[in-house]
Image: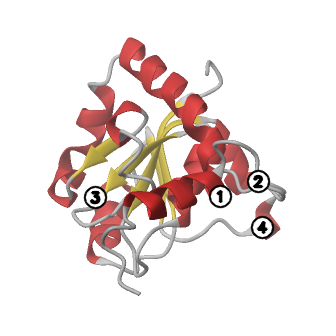
Amino acid sequence: MENRTNLGFWAGHRNSKIRVILARVWENDTELAISNNRINRAIGELVYQKQFYRTKFCICPGGSQVNSARISDSIHYGCVPVILSDYYDLPFNDVLDWRKFAVVLKERDVYELKSILKSISQQEFVALHKSLVQVQKHFVWHSPPVPYDAFHMVMYELWLRHHVIKY
């Protein structure tokens, strides 16, 4: 955790209103590494992945899709996800308490993003990070499945909803 010197990180396309605002407001900030485009592999090997390892909070704004790969990327690399959306139906939301391992914000919070992240104490960050490390196993897909991995989480979510599924 001591290698996480950047406050926040996001790189992606401006394909939604919140992403346009995020880039416009924060792309020149010195503590938030906000990039207007995806990081090109030509500038160096694993530059995108290394950015996750150097950052405390990875910003996951809504995009043109239902969800964002950045959420699973940030979980995989141990970077506390900052969900910046009014409409995400977060994975395994019926089972996991996202507020224990992520920062969940409304889109209107984008203007105060830096002050919100800076207001999170080191002790609170450590607690979020420890919880994040504990839930990482639920987002890994094994073949064959292992207990509590993504396969089992999906099956459990389906079982929880079995009473509303019509055949």
Q: Is residue 60 above or below residue 51?
A: below
The residue sitting at 59% across, 69% down in the picture is 38
Helix, strand or loop at label 4? It is helix
For residue 145, which numbered disc appears in the image? 2
SS class of the residue under badge 1?
Answer: helix
Q: Quadrant of residue 165?
A: bottom left
CA distance separating discs 4 and 2: 32 Å
Helix, strand or loop under label 2: loop
> Label 1 near label 2: C-beta < 8 Å?
yes
Q: Give yes or no for contact between labels 2 and 3 (Cβ–Cβ under 8 Å).
A: no
Q: Assess whether mark 2 and mark 4 are in contact (beta carbons under 8 angstroms).
A: no
Q: Position of residue 125 (x, y in %)?
A: 42, 23
Are discs 3 and 4 less than 8 Å apart at CB? no
Q: Earlier in the sequence, mark 4 or mark 2?
A: 4
- Name the residue at 29% across, 46% down: 104
| Residue 158 vs residue 41, the one in the foreground | 158
Query: Which residue lies at the image location 78% right of the left edge and 67% below the top edge?
Result: 41
Residue type at mark 1 is: Phe
Question: Could you tell me how far apart the alpha carbons at marks 1 and 4 are, in whole angstroms?
Answer: 31 Å
Pointers 1 and 4 in contact (CB under 8 A)?
no
Q: Nearer the viewer, mark 4 or mark 2?
A: 2
Query: x, y (%) of residue 61?
Result: 37, 62
Of 162 and 139, nearer the camera is: 162
Q: CA distance from mark 2 to mark 3?
A: 43 Å
Q: Secondary structure at mark 3?
A: helix
> In the picture, residue 138 is in which quadrant?
top right
| Residue at the spot of label 4 | 41
